[in-house]
Image (cartoon, grey):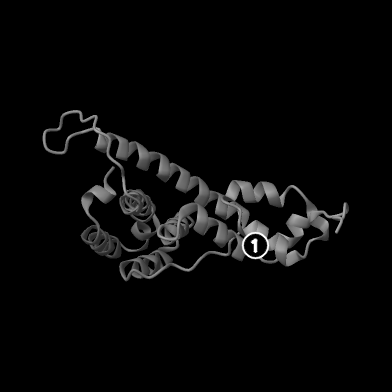
């Protein structure tokens, strides 16, 4: 059977276009696709939260997605949001996932950029660590492979550091809220995480 010469994205079902958008590997590519044609933009708009979360899960990984979300949420807090900061920390201490924000491309771009920075510094840290003998401290040129679980641990440490900076800075929401809450929550946070995960 002869293929039709009139097939285009405009003739595809909306559900198929949404599935194509959901399969895109990262947020910058998704943004470029959405802005490239009216059919992509209209198909994306009504279900953008679902599509964005699918793409971020692929770009950041399912293991690190909760870390990225809580760091984003903490970065959006204002000085007067002390109660919200305490809620975030309470969920985090209980290992509960923080609810997703109302995703749009601008928020997703913040997470995408943050993950690129985390990945860059994580790779730099791993390269330095693997080039030094842990016993003698001398240079070690032997090639060693970082396993996926170790990459997750390294990247999570950088997310934890960012979360610590967002919540416990001197002009942040917890410090402005109540001094006793700031000190108590900071102590709980430091008890939960190793110092190497927080101090870079």
Q: What number of labels is visible?
A: 1
Name the element at disc 1.
helix
Percent position of residue 40, x then y:
74, 55
For the C terminus, the image quarter is top left
Camera-nearest residue between 123 and 180: 123
Percent position of residue 12, x then y:
79, 61
Residue depicted at x 27% and y 60%: 189
Relative horizontal placement of residue 76, taking residue 184 as reference (left or right): right
Relative horizontal placement of residue 10, taking residue 112 as reference (left or right): right
The part of the image, by quadrant, that contains residue 44 is bottom right
For the N terminus, the image quarter is bottom right
User: Label 1: which residue?
Assistant: 48
Relative horizontal placement of residue 133, taking residue 177 as reference (left or right): left
Percent position of residue 30, x then y:
63, 51
Relative horizontal placement of residue 121, taking residue 4 as reference (left or right): left
User: Which residue appears farthest toward the front when viewing the image?
Assistant: 1
The part of the image, by quadrant, that contains residue 179 is bottom left
Percent position of residue 170, x then y:
33, 50
CA neighbours of label 1 inside 10 A, class few (<14), some (14 to 19), many (20+):
many
Residue depicted at x 28% and y 63%: 185
Q: In the image, is residue 68 above or below residue 46?
A: above
């Amino acid at each position: 059977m002869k293929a039709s010469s009139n097939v285009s994205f405009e003739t595809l079902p909306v559900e198929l276009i949404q599935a194509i958008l959901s399969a895109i590997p990262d947020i910058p590519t998704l943004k470029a696709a959405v802005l490239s044609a009216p059919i992509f933009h209209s198909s994306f708009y009504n279900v953008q939260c679902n599509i964005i979360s699918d793409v971020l899960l692929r770009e950041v990984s399912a293991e690190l997605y909760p870390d990225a979300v809580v760091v984003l949420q903490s970065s959006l807090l204002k000085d007067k949001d002390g109660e919200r900061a305490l809620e975030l920390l309470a969920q985090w201490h209980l290992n509960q996932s923080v609810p997703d924000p109302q995703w749009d491309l601008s928020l997703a771009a913040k997470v995408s950029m943050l993950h690129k920075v985390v990945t860059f510094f994580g790779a730099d840290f791993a390269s330095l660590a693997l080039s030094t003998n842990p016993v003698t401290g001398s240079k070690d040129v032997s090639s060693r492979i970082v396993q996926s679980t170790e990459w997750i641990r390294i990247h999570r440490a950088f997310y934890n550091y960012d979360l610590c900076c967002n919540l416990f800075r001197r002009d942040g929401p917890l410090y402005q809220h109540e001094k006793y809450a700031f000190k108590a929550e900071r102590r709980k946070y430091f008890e939960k995480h190793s110092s190497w995960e927080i101090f870079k």
